[in-house]
């Protein structure tokens, strides 16, 4: 991973969080800087991992350790999927009843 030093102006109390002293803190800072771009889908987990020198799975696992789940669909998409599953379940239950009635 290629590194670059930049100078930024931040509130003094933020320095502890922006300038951690250990590798773990630096990784957490960097991964959290990337998350908004993953969330708005302008950056993939694969690309974020490459930027950080991690695999996609290690990137996903690190976000999970930080309490951020791996979700690749919107809430609206999830609701649509759940509705399809409900309809399939109902359809399957109706077919079971038909088979039992015929027997």
Image: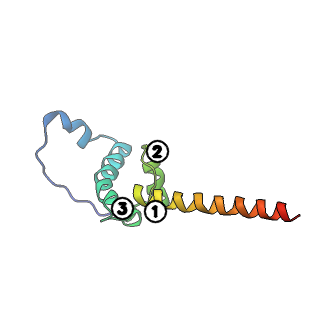
The residue where tag 3 is placed is 48
Number of numbered discs overlaid on the protein picture: 3
Looking at the image, is mark 1 or mark 2 earlier in the sequence? Answer: 1
- The residue wearing badge 1 is 56
How packed mark 2 is, by other alpha carbons closer than 10 Å (few <14, some 14-19, many 20 or more), is few
Q: Kindly state the secondary structure of the residue where label 2 is placed.
A: helix
Q: Which residue is mark 2?
A: 65
Left or right of residue 82, residue 101 in this image: right
**Residue 97 in picture, x, y percent from top left:** 77, 59
Q: Quadrant of residue 99?
A: bottom right
Tell me the quadrant of the picture where the C terminus can be found. Answer: bottom right
Q: Is residue 74 visible?
A: no
Where residue 48 sits: x, y (%)? 36, 62
SS for callout 1:
helix
| For the residues bearing labels 3 and 1, Cβ distance under 8 angstroms | no
Q: Earlier in the sequence, mark 3 or mark 1?
A: 3
């Amino acid at each position: 991973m290629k590194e670059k030093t930049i100078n930024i102006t931040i509130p003094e109390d933020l320095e502890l969080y922006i300038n951690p002293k250990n590798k773990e803190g630096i990784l957490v800072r960097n991964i959290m800087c990337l998350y908004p771009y993953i969330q708005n889908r302008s950056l993939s987990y694969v690309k974020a991992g490459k930027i950080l020198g991690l695999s996609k799975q290690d990137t996903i696992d690190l976000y999970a350790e930080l309490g951020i789940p791996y979700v690749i669909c919107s809430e609206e998409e999830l609701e649509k999927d759940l509705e399809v599953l409900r309809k399939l379940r109902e359809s399957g239950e109706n077919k079971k009843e038909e088979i039992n009635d015929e027997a």
